[in-house]
Structure formats: C-alpha cells, structure tokens
Amino acid sequence: MLRRFLLPVLALAALAAAALPSFAAYPEKPIRLIVPSAPGGAPDALMRALAQQLSQQMGVSIVIDNKPGGSYVIGTMDLVHSAPDGYTLAYGNVVSLATNKSLLATVPYDVEKDLTLIANALRVSNLMIVNNNVPVKTVPELISYAKQNPGKLAFASDGNGTTAHLGVELFKAMTGVHMLHVPYRAATSAVTDLIGGGIQLMMVNAPVSGPLVQAGKARALGISSPQRSATYPDVPTIAESVPGFEVTAWGGIIGPANMPKDIVKRLNTEIRTALATPAVRERFRLLGAETAPSTPEEFLELSRRETLKWAKIVKFSGAKVD
C-alpha cells in the first residue's frame, strides 16, 4: 500500500526536479546586453543604470555591448543570430519593434518570429514647444493659428521617422492643420534654430525641451503623454485638446526567438524588481524617463499596437528612412 502511494509522489518529485535546473542555475556566467545605439546616448545611459541593478540582484556581470547603426537593425540582427539561452539580450524600442516596419524599405527580422519580448522598461514623453514669437499659448490657439496660416509654420525634428517627426505628423492628421517639416541631424541643432526663430515649433523629448521652457527660451503648449507629467504639472496634455492623442517613446529588454519560458519568466521578474528600486527610478527620472514595467504579453501587445498606429502615420506623412 505504502509503495503504491509513494511511487506517484516520487515520480512527481522527479519531474519537478527535472524542470528546475535551467531556471535555478541561470545565470551562471556574464550576460551580454546589446544596445543598438552609440555610447553616451540616452538608451545607453538608461540601460547601464538598469544593468547595474540587475547585476547586483542576479549575482553576475551584465556587459553593455554598443552596436549602433542602421536604425537599430545592426544590433538587433546581432541578437537574432545569438543563442536563445538568456546570455545575450538587447534593448528594443519603438524604433526597432514598431516604426522600422513602415519606415524602412526592408527589415531583415520579424519581431514576432525572430525575437522574444521580455519586458518593457521605460517611456519618455515629448513636449510640444514653440518659439516665443509665435502668437499662441495653448494647443487650441495653435490649431486655430495654423489653419488661418496654412503652410506658414515650420516644425523641426531630429530626423525622418523619429517620434519628434511622426508625433507632429500625428497631430496634423488628427487636427487637419498643415505645417512644413524640417528634419535635422540632431535635436540640439533644431533647438538652436527654434530659439533663433528660424523654426516655429518642435515636439521633442522632455529632457531636451524642458530646460528651455524653464529658462524662458521657448513656450510649452502641451505634453504628449496621456496624463500630465509630475515634472511639468502646469503643462496640459495635448490630449486635453485633441482627444486620443498620445506619443511616447518606449523601450525594454528583448531576446532571440525560442528562449526557454522559465528564463523569460526569471528575467521579467528581475527586471520588474529592478525598475521598482529607488535608485533606478531616480536615475531614470534624471535622464527624463519614467519606469514602465510590463509582462512579456503586455510588451508584445504594445509592439503590435504601436506598429499599426505608426504605419498609418507613416503612410499619411510619406516619411521614409534610407
């Protein structure tokens, strides 16, 4: 009787033990985290802050490997060709996981077939700012002024296909206004021309535009997030005047396709824990980002939703990236 009772119990215990090793033993060596942009930029700084906390939690080194170029394609393809064992991860964002599909003539990877989306980590909002000489102080006033002066307002961006560009294209599509796009190679050059009066409007990341507004060098009309920012509580959301408007840059941790589910679960748990620490939250805040943890399923849904959203705006604007 005892033998008949114990055999199933022992069998279950053996199965459970067999399922544990990859989760329990991982990680046993350093993890490479590919950042598909140059050292010193915001993605690099944000991922270094997250990697430092993850390293402390997981007990192994997490080594940043910058692979810039090709609208995030070079670094992402390095990940695609890596072993799906959890020891090579990468930063994936609105560019590599959403807008590239519409902006590039060809994308050599399929987000859903070639990648594993592990956890979103952050979001960054844009401020819509105008030169102080533009006679508007609110979003409704801007819409009215632009309709009365079609084509006379020029907006700057830090390049075709960026959220600074596509965000204003979305605004144009939702309001019916006409403004001219002037792309720059860098946001700093665009900001210089805006302050000087050569450009009238920009929708640029809050870390870049916020100090200008606080110094009185430009005027903020609205913020692109769905809720007001704690950093700029007096700046209304654009959605308060244009219902449904939202533009946020976002990004998180991804891996190659076919990663073991237990390792994905472990990484997701560790990332969410790291993002909840005061040190990471404060570092992100100083870099102009908010922590935005997610489950793998939520991250994939975000990618799908944003891919469809920006495909419509890219088609409307005719934007392309060579």
Image: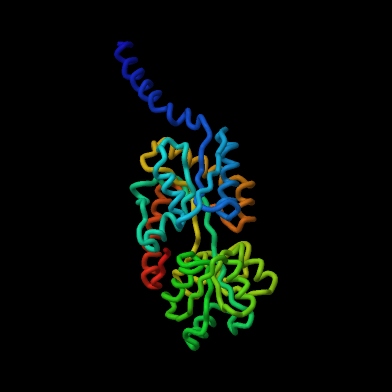
Q: Compared to 82, does 176 lie above or below?
A: below
How many numbered badges does the structure rendering display? 0
> Residue 234 versus residue 216: which sits nearer the camera?
216
Residue at image coords 61%, 62%: 207
Quarter where residue 104 is shown: bottom left
Rendering coords of residue 250 (x, y %): 49, 56
On-image quarter of the C terminus: bottom left
Residue at image coords 30%, 11%: 1
> Residue 1 versus residue 156: which sits nearer the camera?
156
> Residue 143 versus residue 228: which sits nearer the camera?
143
Can residue 58 be seen by looking at this rendering?
A: yes
Q: Compared to 137, does 126 lie above or below?
A: above
Rendering coords of residue 145 (x, y %): 52, 85
Quarter where residue 17 is shown: top left
How are the residues colored? rainbow
Rendering coords of residue 159 (x, y %): 50, 67
